[in-house]
Image (tube, grey):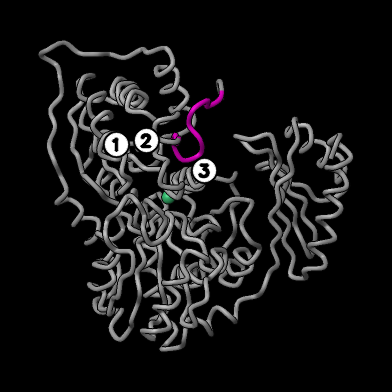
């Protein structure tokens, strides 16, 4: 790969409004995108207070470089991705900062096939952005704008039609869209599947009065209480742009996202009989256990949903059978729906999971999954790359995988050490069934890390 991304991260560019993130910046991103992708571009936004202003800036950049714009208004990122793909638009952009706090906003760039723009193309876009190399049109080439919010129905239909009619009948669910765009989709999807739906934080509100856009166990306490109070079968919550979904079970307990992945994987793999499950190296071994139970094979990628999505597309193009993909953070990808994380589809899929268990409680099903102990830590250092290398040297006699950072694989545990892309630190993950084994492995790695980092 030529060069390196400077402004965009793994899922778009993000910053604090009035500081790094300004209408001027977004105008230039729009102009750069419009200079690269001619034709009709669909734009959308989440519910942040700055969303409308930034959308206007984005559209100005696109229109002045000759693109036509379809403004979808407020909608989930996966809904925009689905609409771009099925309406054969030439690309898109979503104004969102996903799970970041309210003062943030940002832009995700979407390709015509509904996937997020690849690193290679983002580097070209950034090149145009920094050089201000924009193909601004004359008076007779300026694009025109139309609105398209009625297309949101297409996304809802696609998910509902994926399942047998009335599959959710007899189930009660509570939906917490976190004042975000899923308020327009997930309650409707689950109702149309036959569920009785209660909602909390379901009014579109960029001040996020109920909870922050990141769905944490603490923030979802009111959801848990409502699940218990209504005797619901489960509760589902989304992040700020609803590409992720997380759950609380019938006892009101937050389901750790690797377990959520495992529950849905178990259902999807049982239906598909075999095939590949694509996931980053940082995902729990639980995902491998469940794949193997169904004769499926794991294919590991670097950390980042875009790498999972692109790997799935590549494997399918090569003739492989790919059954499922996703990350251990509630971002799951369904290849027979679309190649991006989809929180609405994940909410719907949990209804199907529960329906397949013949009336058993979700809490019981969760408790039957094998328990793993996960340690997640950060370690600050001025030179993350050489520290990762030092860890690799220190454990060179063991089984090592270098898909992203260094993964040390043992019979009863694994450890992943990666350099942060944005901060001077390394990220450390260790997982084992036995907490004592995980702790011991963590101490081994920290012994190397502290030796290599003077002054710690
Ligand atoms: Mg998100």
Q: Is residue 11 magenta?
A: yes
**Closest to the observer: 199 or 156?**
199
The residue located at (36%, 84%) in the rendering is 230
Point out residue 317 in the picture as x, y percentages from the top left corner: 44, 44
Dot 2: element: strand
Q: CA distance from mark 2 to mark 3?
A: 15 Å
Q: Specify whether 276 is left or right of 419.
A: left
Q: Which residue is mark 3?
A: 307
The residue located at (56%, 71%) in the rendering is 294
Q: Is residue 300 magenta?
A: no
Sequence order check: which comes first, mark 2 or mark 1?
A: 1
Point out residue 160 in the picture as x, y percentages from the top left corner: 26, 67
Quarter the C terminus occupies:
top right
Q: Which residue is mark 1?
A: 92
Q: Specify whether 405 is left or right of 291.
A: right
66 shown above or below 19: above
Q: Specify whether 163 is left or right of 346.
A: left
Location of residue 198 (image quadrant): bottom left
Neighbourhood count class around disc 1 (C-alpha, 10 Å): few under 14, some 14–19, many 20 upward: many
Q: Are marks 2 and 1 in contact (CB under 8 Å)?
A: yes
Q: Which residue is mark 2?
A: 109
The residue located at (37%, 25%) in the rendering is 25
**Closest to the observer: 44 or 454?**
454
Dot 3: element: helix
Q: CA distance from mark 2 to mark 1?
A: 6 Å
Q: Which residues are magenta?
A: 4-15
Point out residue 429 in the picture as x, y percentages from the top left corner: 70, 53
**Closest to the observer: 157 or 105?**
105
Check residue 285 in the rendering and tell me which mark sits there, or answer none. none
């Amino acid at each position: 790969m030529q060069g390196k991304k400077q402004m965009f991260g793994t899922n778009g560019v993000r910053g604090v409004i009035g500081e790094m993130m300004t209408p001027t910046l977004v105008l230039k991103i729009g102009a750069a995108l419009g200079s690269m992708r001619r034709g009709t571009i669909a734009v959308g936004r989440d519910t942040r207070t700055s969303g409308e202003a930034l959308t206007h800036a984005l559209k100005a950049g696109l229109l002045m470089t000759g693109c036509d714009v379809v403004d979808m208004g407020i909608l989930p990122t996966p809904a925009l991705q689905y609409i771009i793909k099925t309406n054969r638009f030439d690309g898109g952009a979503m104004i969102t900062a996903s799970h970041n706090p309210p003062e943030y906003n940002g832009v995700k760039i979407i390709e015509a096939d509904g996937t997020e723009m690849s690193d290679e193309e983002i580097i070209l876009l950034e090149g145009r952005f920094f050089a201000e190399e924009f193909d601004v049109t004359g008076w007779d080439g300026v694009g025109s704008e139309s609105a398209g919010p009625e297309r949101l129905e297409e996304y809802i239909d696609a998910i509902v039609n994926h399942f047998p009619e009335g599959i959710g009948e007899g189930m009660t669910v509570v939906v917490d869209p976190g004042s975000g765009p899923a308020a327009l989709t997930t309650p409707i999807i689950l109702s149309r599947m036959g569920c009785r739906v209660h909602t909390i934080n379901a009014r579109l509100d960029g001040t996020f009065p109920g909870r922050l856009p990141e769905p944490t166990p603490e923030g979802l306490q009111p959801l848990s209480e409502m699940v218990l109070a209504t005797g619901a079968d489960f509760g589902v919550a989304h992040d700020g742009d609803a590409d992720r979904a997380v759950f609380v079970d019938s006892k009101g307990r937050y389901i750790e996202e690797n377990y959520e992945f495992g529950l849905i994987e178990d259902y999807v793999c049982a239906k598909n009989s075999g095939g590949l499950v694509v996931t980053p190296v940082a995902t729990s071994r639980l995902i491998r256990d469940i794949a193997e139970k169904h004769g499926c094979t794991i294919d590991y990628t670097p950390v980042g949903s875009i790498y999972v999505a692109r790997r799935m597309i590549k494997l399918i193009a090569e003739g492989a059978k790919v059954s499922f993909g996703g990350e251990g953070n509630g971002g799951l990808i369904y290849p027979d729906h679309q190649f991006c994380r989809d929180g609405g589809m994940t909410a719907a899929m949990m209804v199907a999971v529960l329906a397949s268990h013949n009336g058993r409680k979700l809490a019981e099903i969760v408790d039957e999954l094998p328990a793993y102990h996960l340690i997640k830590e950060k370690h600050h250092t001025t030179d993350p790359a050489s520290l990762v290398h030092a860890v690799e040297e220190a454990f060179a006699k063991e089984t090592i995988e270098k898909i992203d950072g260094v993964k040390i694989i043992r019979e009863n545990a694994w450890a992943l050490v990666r350099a942060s892309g944005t901060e001077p630190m390394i990220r450390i993950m260790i997982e084992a069934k036995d907490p004592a084994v995980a702790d011991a492995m963590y101490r081994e790695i920290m012994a190397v890390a502290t030796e290599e980092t003077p002054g710690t």
